[in-house]
Image (spheres, grey):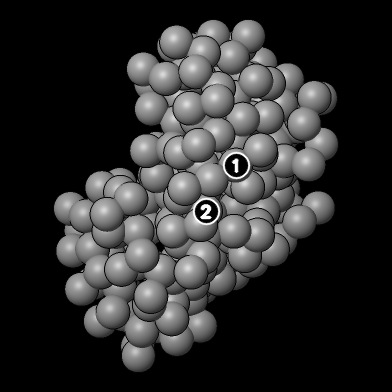
C-alpha cells in the first residue's frame, strides 16, 4: 500500500472526477495519464463510481486511483473492495477517522478549520484535505497555518482552478491541489479524450514550472 505522503507527492494535481457512465472510466483515465496526471480521485457521487474505480484499476495500472467523497465506514470498505489505492473525505467524523486508521488505506481526511486539522493530526494523519478551500479562506488560511501546524501537509480542494492552483502550490505546506478543470463534465460526456489530454498536459506543465 502507498502512504498518503507518497500519493500526494506523485504530482501537483489530483483531478476530482465525477463519472456517471462506467464506460467512460478507462478512456478518461488513459487520457489523463497521457497528459502526465497519474493520481485520480473518483468521487462517490454517482452509482457508477465504484465500478469506475474497479475498471480503472483493471485497465490502467500506472494510475493511482482513489475514492473521493467518502462519508462513512461502509463507503470506505466499498472503496477498498473496488481496489482504491487511497480515500478522500470532505470532512471527518470520529467513526470514519477510526475506520480509516484501522484499514491502513492511504487516506486524506477533510478539514476546514485549524481545530479539525489538529484533531486529525492527533489521530495520526499527516496529510489533510483542506475543503472547501476557497470558502474556508484559501491561500491566506493555509499560509497562516504554516507556523502553528508545521508537521501537516495539505491538499486544498474546492474552488481551486487553473488560475489559482499555482498560488496554493507555492506554499510550503501544500503538497498538491485537487480540481476538476482538467476533466470538465461536458468533455467527458462528449468523450473528448484528446481534449482532456491537452488540458491535463497544460495543467501539468503549468504547475511544475
Res. 209 mark:
none
Bin the neighbour count of mark 1 within 10 Å (Cα to Cα): few under 14, some 14-19, many 20 and up.
many
| Residue lying at 59% horizontally and 36% vertically, measured from the top left | 32
Task: Tell me the distance, in whole angstroms, between the alpha carbons under discs 2 and 1.
Answer: 7 Å
Q: Position of residue 47 (x, y in %)?
A: 52, 11
Q: Is residue 144 left or right of residue 18?
A: left
Between 46 and 206, the residue placed more toward the observer is: 206
Percent from the top left, x then y, of residue 154?
44, 66
Residue displayed at 69% across by 63% down: 6
Residue that numbered label 1 is attached to: 35
Q: Quadrant of residue 118?
A: bottom left
For the point 25% across and 47% down, the residue is 159
Residue depicted at 63% across the width and 47% down the height: 36
Q: Which residue is denoted by mark 2 in the rendering?
A: 204
Query: Left of 34 or right of it: where is 73?
Result: left
Which quadrant of the figure has residue 183?
top left
The earlier-in-sequence mark between 2 and 1 is: 1
Residue 82, image x, y percentages = 72, 26
Residue 164 seen in render: yes
Give residue 9's quadrant in the image: bottom right
Q: Is residue 114 above or below residue 48?
A: below
Q: Nearer the viewer, residue 140 or 121?
A: 140
Q: State the residue in front, 140 or 203.
A: 203
Query: Does residue 122 appear left or right of residue 180 in this picture?
Result: right
- Is the residue under label 1 in contact with that under label 2 (CB below 8 Å)? yes
Q: Up-down: is 2 above or below 182?
A: below
The reply to whether residue 77 is in sight is no
Mark 2 Cα shell of 10 Å, populated few (<14), some (14-19), many (≥20):
some
For numbered disc 1, what is the local secondary structure?
loop
Q: What kind of element bears circle 2?
A: helix
Amino acid at each position: 500500500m502507498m502512504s498518503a505522503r507518497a500519493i500526494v507527492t506523485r504530482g501537483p494535481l489530483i483531478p476530482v472526477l465525477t463519472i456517471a457512465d462506467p464506460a467512460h472510466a478507462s478512456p478518461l483515465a488513459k487520457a489523463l495519464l497521457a497528459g502526465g496526471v497519474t493520481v485520480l480521485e473518483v468521487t462517490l457521487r454517482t452509482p457508477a463510481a465504484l465500478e469506475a474505480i474497479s475498471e480503472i484499476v483493471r485497465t490502467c495500472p500506472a494510475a493511482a486511483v482513489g475514492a473521493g467523497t467518502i462519508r462513512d465506514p461502509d463507503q470506505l470498505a466499498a472503496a477498498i473492495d473496488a481496489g482504491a489505492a487511497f480515500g478522500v473525505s470532505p470532512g471527518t467524523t470520529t467513526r470514519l477517522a477510526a475506520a480509516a486508521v484501522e484499514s491502513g488505506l492511504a487516506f486524506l481526511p477533510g478539514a476546514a478549520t485549524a481545530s479539525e486539522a489538529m484533531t486529525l493530526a492527533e489521530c495520526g494523519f499527516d496529510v489533510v484535505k483542506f475543503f472547501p478551500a476557497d470558502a474556508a479562506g484559501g491561500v491566506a488560511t493555509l499560509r497562516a497555518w504554516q507556523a502553528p501546524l508545521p508537521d501537516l501537509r495539505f491538499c486544498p480542494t474546492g474552488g481551486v482552478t487553473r488560475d489559482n492552483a499555482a498560488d496554493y502550490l507555492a506554499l510550503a505546506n501544500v503538497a498538491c491541489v485537487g480540481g476538476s478543470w482538467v476533466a470538465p463534465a461536458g468533455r467527458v460526456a462528449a468523450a473528448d479524450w484528446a481534449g482532456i489530454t491537452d488540458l491535463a498536459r497544460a495543467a501539468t506543465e503549468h504547475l511544475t514550472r
